[in-house]
Amino acid sequence: MKKFSSVILAGFLALSAVLAGCSGSVSETGSPAAGTEPAQASGKDEITLYTIQSTNPNFQEWLKETEEKSGVKINWVAAPTDSDTRQQKLSTILSSGDSSVDILEINDEMATSFKNAGWLEPLQDKVLTADILKQLPQGYMKDMLTSNKGDVIGVPTYTGYLALWVDQKKLDEAGMTSIDTEEDFVNFLKATTKDGHYGYGGSWEKTYVFNEVATFVQLFGGDYLDWTNENSRKAVKFMYDMANTWKVTPIDQIADKYEQMNQKFIDGKYAAVFMWGTGTDYKQANRYGPDQIHMINMPKFEKRSIFTDSWSYVLNSASKNKEAAIKFLQYAASEDGELNGWKNFDRYPARADVASNEAVSGDIKGIYTEIQQTNEVHGRPMLPQTMEFISEMGTLFQNYIQDKITLDDFCKKAQEAVERYK
Amino acid sequence: MADKISRPLPLILLMWGLAAIVAFLILFPLWWIFVSSITPAGELFSKPIKYWPAHPTLDSYRYLINNVGLLPKITDTAIIVGLSILIGMIVSVMAAFSFARFRSRGLTIAVGFLLASMLIPDVVTARPLYDFLRSVHLYDTYTGLILLYISGLLPFSILILQNYLGDIPVSIEESAAIDGCGFFQSMYYVTVPLLRPALATVCIVNFITCLNNFFTPLFYSNGISVLSTAITQLPLRDNMYAVPWDLVSAMGWIIILPIIIFVAVFQRQIMEGIMAGGVKG
């Protein structure tokens, strides 16, 4: 019996060994997967790209054109689009010195977390040279993609403003033709607040509200990371007044994310909102257009200022295919690369000179150009532990708006949070 | 039977009412996910709420098949889940048998370690395991994933099977031995058939565990993509905050469907397993 059992056990061990040997893996493209041999082993210019665009219907067309024009063979890996999941995964890849992925596509939160960690290759010498850099939004590049050492670590793939959207019918009803100043803005909100409808709609859920608080702080000329600054205080006081003094925005929106806010905007409950993107939700609901919901320039408070976000290509420092990766990045930063993104992914070019190209057309171009020319364009003020900081600030803001703490308490605690997370 | 007939009508109505409420609580979310999956994106948040879309469409499912690579993901899932359950079951039965039938300090310690491993969260071992898998070239491989899935299934499977085996008299195996059965013949022809209800129960639980396993395929693979992680790869719309709820719902329904089918097919065995365990206790 013992002998027989030993034979069976040995059989299982052999099976395990065989299974362990069958380690050939397949990536999404059928090419050698990440985690095996470096791409250079094939003798060609070849990289592995970690991308969120792989499920876009036009991804294959974008890929084909990119490979043809950059001369680089691209193996791709689908990145999670869910932000928490993606951040965990990318942190592991980068911090472990994993060379299986050469180029990664990261958003602002990740750029903030990674840019000073030494995991990403500087790009200013070979990719983002001075002539290209000057065409990109300076504030954004400085705030978001420049490390403490002054290295530029990412190639932004588009410009996407957190812009002011208004319902033209309500603007007409208010007898106004434009919202150009702080006074116009407040007058418009007051004029359109009636019968259970509000002048301003926000997404004040504790993490989402960060975007709006930071926007108002910018408009008032404050500094989100300095709550001793009088203009920062003015901004949150302004938001408090909107909800509590003038009552031009509902306080129950502290539970709303963008889905809820947009639906209410589409339903006509709000007259104006700050929103990202190019109005896809409004188009889908047949509420988009110059006589309906459309984007307008930011009103001038202390100044005109707007946030942009982007996804950026970054180069993994551990990459073994840096030469090929640089070629890819040079293409991505070029006019051809940006136009490819516009054509296939509707990504509005980040470079001003490319945005002015006649190939970039459509109703969004006019307002984007106006915003670009008249506003300070910044990246959002983030700290390395991005989500923790955002969440804590959001909770403080909600407490202030609900009169649980005073403005002084809010500013004091906000400054403490800044110091803690810095 | 006489008992059933003698039940008063109000009691019967109450029982049916409660059953209907429970069924509604369980089924309504499933219904809502399905409705969302066939609702065009522009109608998803319309008011008043529509419990059936004005323009039902299968576009979300088409999108998943054409752009998200649904079929390769189903194949990957089937390979990994199928092999993990099969191999895991064989190993579990053998381990449970040894733990139930033999006594030694070493075995007791082994059982203790095995059960203690259930208490360790995946995230604690993630980074060292990630480095280890890369160093032995098992990262992003079917083999690596299957081994990890199996290691996750073993403690629970062994625990259940060992308890169940403890209730099966050893004398049955001794009788088989007297009749000339070898060890593995006895296992195959006598013990395993008696374990069938427990095996069915373990099998369904393992199947659900494997299908729901999100952390392992997410963390230890890149190219191999299973259904549970595919839900994180759906495209963002317009901006990074725009979640495509229609696609999320369709993908959710695709992940739920195999579990519903599996439970429907093996419902009798599962109930037998639970009932048998209850009676033996």
Image: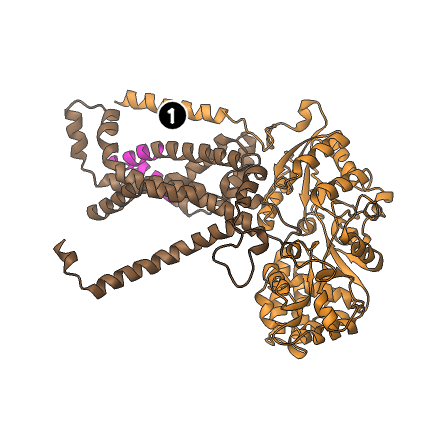
Question: Farthest residue toward the left?
Answer: B2
Vertical order, A103 against A189 (above or below): above
Colour of chain B in the rendered structure image:
brown
Look at the numbered disc 1 and give the secondary structure of its residue: helix
Judge from the rendering whether residue B125 lies leftward or rightward of residue B277; answer left or right: right
Identified by mark 1, the residue type is Phe
Q: Is residue B38 a member of the stretch shown in magenta?
A: no
Does B252 appear above or below A410?
above
Residue B113 forms part of the magenta stretch:
yes
Q: Quadrant of residue A214?
A: bottom right
Q: Main secondary structure of the magenta part?
A: helix
Instruction: Give the residue at x 48% y 52%.
Output: B35
Q: Most extreme residue toward the front, as rendered?
A: B54
Q: For chain A, what colour was chosen?
A: orange
Residues in magenta? B91-115
Measured as percent of width and height from the top left, residue A265 is found at 64, 64
Q: Nearer the viewer, residue B81 or B128?
A: B81
Colour mapping used in the image: by chain
Residue placed under numbered mark 1 in the picture? A12
Q: Position of residue A149 (x, y in %)?
A: 78, 48
A150 is higher (above) or lower (below) than A267: above
Q: Spot the residue most to the bottom.
A: A245
> Residue placed at 51% from the left, 54% from the top?
B53
Q: Position of residue A36 (x, y in %)?
A: 60, 29
Residue A26, located in which quarter of the rendered image?
top right
Instruction: Residue lying at the far right in this picture: please name it.
Output: A131
